[in-house]
Amino acid sequence: MPSHIHSVSKIHRIASIPGDGIGVEITQAAEKVLHVLAKTLGGFEFDFTTFDWSSANFLKRGWYMPPDGIEQLKNHDAIYFGAVGSPDVPDHISLWGLILPIRKSLNQYVNVRPTRILPGTTSPLTTCKPADLDWVIVRENSEGEYSGQGGTSHGDTTYAVATEVSIFSYTGIHRIMKYAFETARSRPRKKLTMVTKSNAQRHGMVLWDKIFYEVAKEYEDVEIDKMLVDAMTVRMVLNPESMDTIVATNLHADILSDLAAALSGSIGIAPSSNLDPTRENPSMFEPIHGSAPDIAGKGIANPVGAFWSAAEMVRWVGQEVAADKLMQAIENVTKAGIKTKDLGGQKNTEEVTTAVCQEIERLF
Ligand code: NAI
Ligand code: MG
Protein backbone atom coordinates (compact mmCIF):
# COMPACT_ATOMS: atom_id res chain seq x y z
CA MET A 1 0.00 0.00 0.00
CA PRO A 2 1.41 3.46 -0.86
CA SER A 3 2.51 5.19 2.32
CA HIS A 4 0.17 8.15 1.90
CA ILE A 5 -2.90 5.86 2.09
CA HIS A 6 -3.80 4.88 5.64
CA SER A 7 -5.96 1.90 6.36
CA VAL A 8 -9.13 2.73 8.30
CA SER A 9 -8.58 2.57 12.02
CA LYS A 10 -11.16 0.85 14.22
CA ILE A 11 -12.52 3.28 16.81
CA HIS A 12 -13.48 2.00 20.26
CA ARG A 13 -15.84 4.41 21.98
CA ILE A 14 -15.11 4.47 25.71
CA ALA A 15 -17.20 6.18 28.38
CA SER A 16 -14.78 7.40 31.03
CA ILE A 17 -15.99 8.07 34.58
CA PRO A 18 -13.00 9.21 36.68
CA GLY A 19 -15.17 9.83 39.80
CA ASP A 20 -13.44 10.90 43.00
CA GLY A 21 -10.05 11.07 44.72
CA ILE A 22 -7.36 8.89 43.19
CA GLY A 23 -10.01 7.65 40.72
CA VAL A 24 -9.33 10.85 38.78
CA GLU A 25 -5.54 10.42 38.94
CA ILE A 26 -5.44 6.79 37.83
CA THR A 27 -8.05 7.28 35.08
CA GLN A 28 -5.93 10.04 33.59
CA ALA A 29 -2.91 7.72 33.73
CA ALA A 30 -4.86 4.84 32.13
CA GLU A 31 -6.14 7.01 29.28
CA LYS A 32 -2.61 8.19 28.58
CA VAL A 33 -1.31 4.62 28.42
CA LEU A 34 -4.20 3.53 26.19
CA HIS A 35 -3.54 6.36 23.73
CA VAL A 36 0.14 5.40 23.54
CA LEU A 37 -0.83 1.74 23.07
CA ALA A 38 -3.20 2.52 20.18
CA LYS A 39 -0.78 4.95 18.54
CA THR A 40 2.14 2.53 18.81
CA LEU A 41 0.32 -0.57 17.62
CA GLY A 42 -1.91 1.15 15.06
CA GLY A 43 -5.11 -0.10 13.46
CA PHE A 44 -7.35 1.07 16.28
CA GLU A 45 -8.03 4.12 18.41
CA PHE A 46 -9.80 4.94 21.64
CA ASP A 47 -12.36 7.73 21.63
CA PHE A 48 -12.97 8.71 25.26
CA THR A 49 -16.05 10.62 26.39
CA THR A 50 -15.58 11.83 29.96
CA PHE A 51 -18.55 11.99 32.32
CA ASP A 52 -18.08 14.34 35.30
CA TRP A 53 -20.20 12.22 37.65
CA SER A 54 -18.51 12.69 41.01
CA SER A 55 -19.18 13.39 44.67
CA ALA A 56 -18.10 17.03 44.32
CA ASN A 57 -20.67 17.51 41.55
CA PHE A 58 -23.28 15.57 43.53
CA LEU A 59 -22.89 18.12 46.34
CA LYS A 60 -23.45 20.95 43.83
CA ARG A 61 -26.18 19.37 41.66
CA GLY A 62 -27.91 16.85 43.91
CA TRP A 63 -27.35 13.93 41.53
CA TYR A 64 -24.52 11.60 40.53
CA MET A 65 -25.97 10.53 37.21
CA PRO A 66 -28.61 12.40 35.19
CA PRO A 67 -31.93 10.59 34.55
CA ASP A 68 -30.75 9.45 31.10
CA GLY A 69 -27.26 8.54 32.37
CA ILE A 70 -27.61 4.83 31.68
CA GLU A 71 -28.87 5.57 28.15
CA GLN A 72 -25.83 7.78 27.57
CA LEU A 73 -23.50 4.97 28.68
CA LYS A 74 -25.22 2.44 26.38
CA ASN A 75 -23.89 4.45 23.48
CA HIS A 76 -20.34 3.16 24.12
CA ASP A 77 -18.30 0.01 23.52
CA ALA A 78 -17.06 -0.09 27.12
CA ILE A 79 -16.92 1.98 30.30
CA TYR A 80 -13.77 2.86 32.19
CA PHE A 81 -14.36 3.72 35.85
CA GLY A 82 -11.96 5.26 38.41
CA ALA A 83 -13.55 5.20 41.87
CA VAL A 84 -16.39 6.87 43.73
CA GLY A 85 -16.50 7.91 47.38
CA SER A 86 -15.79 11.05 49.38
CA PRO A 87 -15.54 11.85 53.08
CA ASP A 88 -18.22 14.53 52.41
CA VAL A 89 -20.91 12.06 51.23
CA PRO A 90 -22.08 8.94 53.11
CA ASP A 91 -20.66 5.91 51.26
CA HIS A 92 -24.05 4.25 50.75
CA ILE A 93 -25.26 7.37 48.94
CA SER A 94 -22.26 7.52 46.60
CA LEU A 95 -22.20 3.78 45.85
CA TRP A 96 -25.96 3.65 45.22
CA GLY A 97 -25.78 6.94 43.32
CA LEU A 98 -23.31 5.76 40.73
CA ILE A 99 -21.55 2.43 40.59
CA LEU A 100 -24.24 0.03 41.76
CA PRO A 101 -26.96 1.38 39.40
CA ILE A 102 -24.52 1.08 36.48
CA ARG A 103 -23.65 -2.53 37.29
CA LYS A 104 -27.32 -3.44 37.72
CA SER A 105 -28.90 -1.47 34.86
CA LEU A 106 -26.34 -2.68 32.35
CA ASN A 107 -26.75 -6.31 33.43
CA GLN A 108 -23.07 -6.57 34.40
CA TYR A 109 -23.75 -9.70 36.38
CA VAL A 110 -20.17 -10.99 36.45
CA ASN A 111 -17.29 -9.30 38.23
CA VAL A 112 -13.95 -10.89 37.36
CA ARG A 113 -11.02 -10.24 39.68
CA PRO A 114 -7.71 -11.86 38.77
CA THR A 115 -4.87 -11.88 41.31
CA ARG A 116 -1.20 -12.61 40.65
CA ILE A 117 2.13 -11.67 42.17
CA LEU A 118 3.66 -9.47 39.48
CA PRO A 119 7.38 -9.76 38.67
CA GLY A 120 9.56 -7.60 40.93
CA THR A 121 6.95 -7.50 43.69
CA THR A 122 6.62 -9.60 46.82
CA SER A 123 3.75 -11.12 48.71
CA PRO A 124 3.49 -10.44 52.44
CA LEU A 125 3.33 -14.24 52.73
CA THR A 126 7.00 -14.95 53.26
CA THR A 127 7.00 -18.47 51.80
CA CYS A 128 4.72 -17.70 48.85
CA LYS A 129 6.42 -17.90 45.46
CA PRO A 130 4.88 -16.03 42.50
CA ALA A 131 3.57 -19.24 40.91
CA ASP A 132 1.81 -20.18 44.16
CA LEU A 133 -0.69 -17.36 43.94
CA ASP A 134 -2.52 -17.17 40.61
CA TRP A 135 -6.25 -16.86 41.13
CA VAL A 136 -9.33 -15.58 39.35
CA ILE A 137 -12.17 -14.62 41.65
CA VAL A 138 -15.56 -14.68 39.92
CA ARG A 139 -17.94 -12.48 41.88
CA GLU A 140 -21.73 -12.51 41.48
CA ASN A 141 -22.40 -8.85 40.67
CA SER A 142 -26.15 -8.37 40.39
CA GLU A 143 -27.97 -9.66 43.46
CA GLY A 144 -27.21 -11.48 46.71
CA GLU A 145 -26.34 -9.34 49.70
CA TYR A 146 -26.17 -6.17 47.55
CA SER A 147 -29.64 -6.49 46.05
CA GLY A 148 -30.75 -3.35 47.88
CA GLN A 149 -33.94 -4.80 49.32
CA GLY A 150 -34.95 -3.91 52.85
CA GLY A 151 -35.89 -0.87 54.84
CA THR A 152 -35.78 0.99 58.11
CA SER A 153 -38.62 1.71 60.54
CA HIS A 154 -38.45 4.12 63.47
CA GLY A 155 -35.06 5.11 62.11
CA ASP A 156 -34.23 7.94 64.49
CA THR A 157 -35.32 6.20 67.67
CA THR A 158 -33.88 3.50 69.89
CA TYR A 159 -36.68 1.27 68.52
CA ALA A 160 -35.09 1.40 65.09
CA VAL A 161 -35.47 -1.76 63.04
CA ALA A 162 -33.64 -2.31 59.76
CA THR A 163 -33.74 -5.21 57.32
CA GLU A 164 -31.15 -5.95 54.66
CA VAL A 165 -32.58 -8.69 52.48
CA SER A 166 -30.33 -10.89 50.38
CA ILE A 167 -31.81 -12.16 47.13
CA PHE A 168 -30.56 -15.39 45.56
CA SER A 169 -32.33 -16.45 42.38
CA TYR A 170 -31.94 -19.63 40.36
CA THR A 171 -31.25 -17.53 37.26
CA GLY A 172 -28.72 -15.34 39.04
CA ILE A 173 -26.82 -18.26 40.56
CA HIS A 174 -26.96 -20.47 37.48
CA ARG A 175 -25.50 -17.84 35.16
CA ILE A 176 -22.62 -17.00 37.51
CA MET A 177 -21.83 -20.70 37.94
CA LYS A 178 -21.75 -21.16 34.15
CA TYR A 179 -19.34 -18.26 33.85
CA ALA A 180 -17.15 -19.58 36.67
CA PHE A 181 -16.96 -23.09 35.21
CA GLU A 182 -16.13 -21.70 31.76
CA THR A 183 -13.38 -19.59 33.32
CA ALA A 184 -11.98 -22.56 35.26
CA ARG A 185 -12.06 -24.71 32.12
CA SER A 186 -10.15 -22.08 30.13
CA ARG A 187 -7.26 -22.05 32.60
CA PRO A 188 -4.47 -24.66 32.72
CA ARG A 189 -5.35 -26.07 36.13
CA LYS A 190 -9.11 -26.45 35.46
CA LYS A 191 -9.98 -26.07 39.09
CA LEU A 192 -12.95 -24.31 40.69
CA THR A 193 -13.52 -23.58 44.37
CA MET A 194 -17.01 -22.47 45.40
CA VAL A 195 -17.45 -20.36 48.53
CA THR A 196 -20.61 -19.97 50.64
CA LYS A 197 -21.68 -19.96 54.26
CA SER A 198 -24.30 -22.64 53.86
CA ASN A 199 -23.96 -23.95 57.38
CA ALA A 200 -25.34 -20.83 59.07
CA GLN A 201 -27.29 -19.36 56.15
CA ARG A 202 -29.62 -22.13 55.25
CA HIS A 203 -31.69 -20.86 52.31
CA GLY A 204 -29.91 -18.76 49.72
CA MET A 205 -26.50 -20.32 50.33
CA VAL A 206 -27.92 -23.82 50.20
CA LEU A 207 -29.38 -22.95 46.80
CA TRP A 208 -25.89 -21.84 45.73
CA ASP A 209 -24.43 -25.19 46.76
CA LYS A 210 -27.19 -27.10 44.97
CA ILE A 211 -26.82 -25.25 41.67
CA PHE A 212 -23.02 -25.52 41.87
CA TYR A 213 -23.21 -29.33 41.91
CA GLU A 214 -25.89 -29.28 39.22
CA VAL A 215 -23.78 -27.20 36.82
CA ALA A 216 -20.65 -29.20 37.74
CA LYS A 217 -22.15 -32.23 35.94
CA GLU A 218 -21.67 -30.40 32.63
CA TYR A 219 -17.97 -29.84 33.43
CA GLU A 220 -16.48 -33.17 34.35
CA ASP A 221 -13.03 -31.98 33.26
CA VAL A 222 -13.10 -29.27 35.97
CA GLU A 223 -11.92 -30.28 39.43
CA ILE A 224 -14.22 -28.81 42.09
CA ASP A 225 -14.28 -28.17 45.79
CA LYS A 226 -16.39 -26.23 48.24
CA MET A 227 -15.39 -23.93 51.11
CA LEU A 228 -17.12 -22.00 53.86
CA VAL A 229 -16.10 -18.38 53.65
CA ASP A 230 -14.47 -18.17 57.09
CA ALA A 231 -12.27 -21.20 56.43
CA MET A 232 -11.54 -19.78 52.99
CA THR A 233 -9.67 -16.80 54.49
CA VAL A 234 -7.40 -19.25 56.31
CA ARG A 235 -6.80 -21.32 53.18
CA MET A 236 -5.97 -18.24 51.11
CA VAL A 237 -3.24 -17.31 53.58
CA LEU A 238 -1.87 -20.78 54.38
CA ASN A 239 -2.37 -22.71 51.11
CA PRO A 240 -2.56 -20.20 48.29
CA GLU A 241 -1.22 -22.75 45.80
CA SER A 242 -4.21 -25.03 46.38
CA MET A 243 -6.61 -22.77 44.47
CA ASP A 244 -7.16 -21.44 40.97
CA THR A 245 -10.63 -20.15 40.04
CA ILE A 246 -12.95 -19.11 42.87
CA VAL A 247 -16.68 -18.34 42.69
CA ALA A 248 -18.51 -16.51 45.48
CA THR A 249 -21.43 -14.23 46.25
CA ASN A 250 -21.42 -10.48 45.86
CA LEU A 251 -20.41 -9.79 49.49
CA HIS A 252 -18.08 -12.73 50.05
CA ALA A 253 -16.16 -12.15 46.83
CA ASP A 254 -15.94 -8.44 47.57
CA ILE A 255 -14.17 -9.20 50.84
CA LEU A 256 -12.07 -12.12 49.58
CA SER A 257 -10.81 -10.13 46.60
CA ASP A 258 -9.44 -7.36 48.84
CA LEU A 259 -7.63 -10.05 50.84
CA ALA A 260 -6.39 -11.59 47.60
CA ALA A 261 -5.08 -8.22 46.44
CA ALA A 262 -3.24 -7.65 49.71
CA LEU A 263 -1.72 -11.16 49.55
CA SER A 264 -0.45 -10.44 46.06
CA GLY A 265 1.35 -7.30 47.23
CA SER A 266 -1.06 -4.34 47.21
CA ILE A 267 -4.67 -3.39 46.61
CA GLY A 268 -3.20 -0.86 44.16
CA ILE A 269 -2.48 -3.52 41.51
CA ALA A 270 -5.82 -5.37 41.43
CA PRO A 271 -8.12 -5.05 38.42
CA SER A 272 -11.78 -5.85 37.94
CA SER A 273 -14.12 -6.32 35.01
CA ASN A 274 -17.88 -5.86 35.39
CA LEU A 275 -19.15 -7.91 32.47
CA ASP A 276 -22.40 -8.34 30.64
CA PRO A 277 -21.39 -11.62 28.96
CA THR A 278 -24.36 -11.33 26.56
CA ARG A 279 -22.69 -8.17 25.19
CA GLU A 280 -26.07 -6.46 24.92
CA ASN A 281 -24.73 -3.68 27.16
CA PRO A 282 -21.27 -2.17 27.56
CA SER A 283 -19.10 -3.75 30.24
CA MET A 284 -17.21 -1.68 32.82
CA PHE A 285 -13.56 -1.89 33.86
CA GLU A 286 -12.12 -0.47 37.09
CA PRO A 287 -9.40 -1.12 39.63
CA ILE A 288 -10.86 -2.75 42.74
CA HIS A 289 -9.60 -0.05 45.08
CA GLY A 290 -11.65 2.98 46.13
CA SER A 291 -10.99 6.72 46.01
CA ALA A 292 -8.34 6.53 48.77
CA PRO A 293 -8.95 9.98 50.31
CA ASP A 294 -5.87 9.46 52.51
CA ILE A 295 -3.53 9.72 49.51
CA ALA A 296 -5.68 11.62 47.00
CA GLY A 297 -4.09 14.66 45.39
CA LYS A 298 -0.55 13.59 46.29
CA GLY A 299 0.25 11.97 42.94
CA ILE A 300 1.42 8.76 44.59
CA ALA A 301 -1.44 6.35 43.78
CA ASN A 302 -0.35 3.10 42.22
CA PRO A 303 -1.67 3.11 38.64
CA VAL A 304 -0.97 -0.61 38.01
CA GLY A 305 -4.51 -1.76 38.95
CA ALA A 306 -5.85 0.88 36.58
CA PHE A 307 -3.54 -0.27 33.77
CA TRP A 308 -4.36 -3.94 34.32
CA SER A 309 -8.10 -3.05 34.24
CA ALA A 310 -7.45 -1.14 31.03
CA ALA A 311 -5.75 -4.24 29.58
CA GLU A 312 -8.83 -6.30 30.42
CA MET A 313 -10.97 -3.68 28.64
CA VAL A 314 -8.70 -3.77 25.59
CA ARG A 315 -9.08 -7.56 25.51
CA TRP A 316 -12.88 -7.32 25.88
CA VAL A 317 -13.23 -4.98 22.89
CA GLY A 318 -11.27 -7.48 20.80
CA GLN A 319 -7.70 -6.12 20.74
CA GLU A 320 -6.02 -9.18 22.20
CA VAL A 321 -2.52 -8.50 20.90
CA ALA A 322 -2.62 -5.00 22.35
CA ALA A 323 -3.90 -6.35 25.69
CA ASP A 324 -1.00 -8.82 25.88
CA LYS A 325 1.51 -6.10 25.04
CA LEU A 326 0.10 -3.81 27.70
CA MET A 327 0.34 -6.57 30.35
CA GLN A 328 3.89 -7.30 29.21
CA ALA A 329 4.80 -3.62 29.54
CA ILE A 330 3.29 -3.40 33.03
CA GLU A 331 5.16 -6.52 34.17
CA ASN A 332 8.46 -5.36 32.68
CA VAL A 333 8.11 -2.09 34.56
CA THR A 334 7.37 -3.74 37.93
CA LYS A 335 10.19 -6.20 37.25
CA ALA A 336 12.59 -3.27 36.75
CA GLY A 337 11.62 -2.03 40.22
CA ILE A 338 9.74 1.03 38.95
CA LYS A 339 7.04 0.93 41.61
CA THR A 340 5.00 3.16 43.89
CA LYS A 341 5.37 3.24 47.68
CA ASP A 342 2.60 0.73 48.39
CA LEU A 343 4.73 -1.87 46.57
CA GLY A 344 7.86 -0.81 48.44
CA GLY A 345 9.10 1.41 45.59
CA GLN A 346 10.13 5.07 45.31
CA LYS A 347 8.24 6.25 42.23
CA ASN A 348 5.09 8.33 41.87
CA THR A 349 2.05 7.83 39.61
CA GLU A 350 3.47 9.88 36.78
CA GLU A 351 6.86 8.14 36.78
CA VAL A 352 5.28 4.68 36.63
CA THR A 353 2.93 5.88 33.88
CA THR A 354 5.79 7.29 31.81
CA ALA A 355 7.76 4.07 32.29
CA VAL A 356 4.84 1.95 31.05
CA CYS A 357 4.36 4.23 28.02
CA GLN A 358 8.07 3.98 27.15
CA GLU A 359 8.01 0.22 27.61
CA ILE A 360 5.03 -0.10 25.22
CA GLU A 361 6.97 1.86 22.61
CA ARG A 362 10.10 -0.27 23.20
CA LEU A 363 8.15 -3.54 22.83
CA PHE A 364 6.94 -2.73 19.29
P1 NAI B 1 -9.60 2.34 49.36
O1 NAI B 1 -9.39 1.23 48.41
O2 NAI B 1 -9.94 3.67 48.77
O3 NAI B 1 -8.29 2.52 50.28
C1 NAI B 1 -7.84 1.53 51.19
C2 NAI B 1 -6.35 1.75 51.48
O4 NAI B 1 -5.58 1.34 50.34
C3 NAI B 1 -6.00 3.20 51.73
O5 NAI B 1 -5.00 3.28 52.72
C4 NAI B 1 -5.45 3.68 50.40
O6 NAI B 1 -4.52 4.71 50.49
C5 NAI B 1 -4.82 2.41 49.85
N1 NAI B 1 -4.91 2.38 48.37
C6 NAI B 1 -6.01 2.15 47.64
N2 NAI B 1 -5.72 2.23 46.34
C7 NAI B 1 -4.42 2.52 46.23
C8 NAI B 1 -3.55 2.74 45.13
N3 NAI B 1 -3.96 2.67 43.85
N4 NAI B 1 -2.25 3.02 45.39
C9 NAI B 1 -1.81 3.09 46.66
N5 NAI B 1 -2.58 2.88 47.73
C10 NAI B 1 -3.88 2.61 47.53
O7 NAI B 1 -10.76 1.88 50.36
P2 NAI B 1 -11.50 2.70 51.53
O8 NAI B 1 -10.52 3.57 52.25
O9 NAI B 1 -12.24 1.69 52.27
O10 NAI B 1 -12.58 3.60 50.79
C11 NAI B 1 -12.37 4.95 50.42
C12 NAI B 1 -13.58 5.42 49.63
O11 NAI B 1 -13.67 4.70 48.40
C13 NAI B 1 -14.90 5.19 50.36
O12 NAI B 1 -15.71 6.31 50.11
C14 NAI B 1 -15.46 3.93 49.71
O13 NAI B 1 -16.87 3.85 49.74
C15 NAI B 1 -14.97 4.11 48.29
N6 NAI B 1 -14.83 2.85 47.53
C16 NAI B 1 -15.22 2.89 46.23
C17 NAI B 1 -15.05 1.79 45.43
C18 NAI B 1 -15.42 1.91 43.99
O14 NAI B 1 -15.61 3.00 43.48
N7 NAI B 1 -15.51 0.82 43.26
C19 NAI B 1 -14.48 0.53 45.94
C20 NAI B 1 -14.05 0.62 47.32
C21 NAI B 1 -14.24 1.74 48.07
MG1 MG C 1 -14.57 -3.85 47.54
Image (cartoon, helix red, strand yellow):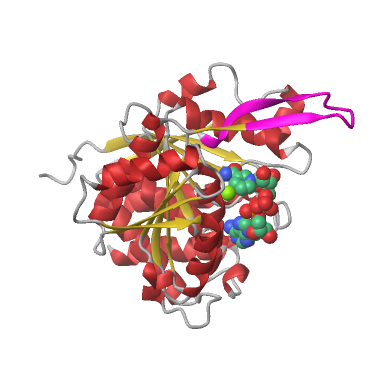
Residue 246 part of the magenta segment: no
Q: Position of residue 206 (x, y in %)?
A: 45, 42
257 in relation to 20, above or below: below
- Apparent side of residue 179 relative to residue 153 in the rendered image (left or right): left
> In this orientation, does residue 225 appear?
yes
27 in relation to 78, above or below: below
185 in relation to 96, above or below: below
The extreme top residue here reads 67
| Quarter of the image that includes the C terminus | bottom left
> In this orientation, does residue 299 appear?
no
Q: Which residues are magenta?
A: 144-164
Residue 191: quadrant of the picture: bottom left
Q: Position of residue 278 (x, y in %)?
A: 30, 31
Residue 2: quadrant of the picture: top left
Depth check, front residue: 61 or 159: 159
Q: Position of residue 280 (x, y in %)?
A: 33, 26
Q: Residue at the location (53% across, 77% down)?
A: 125
Residue 160 part of the magenta segment: yes
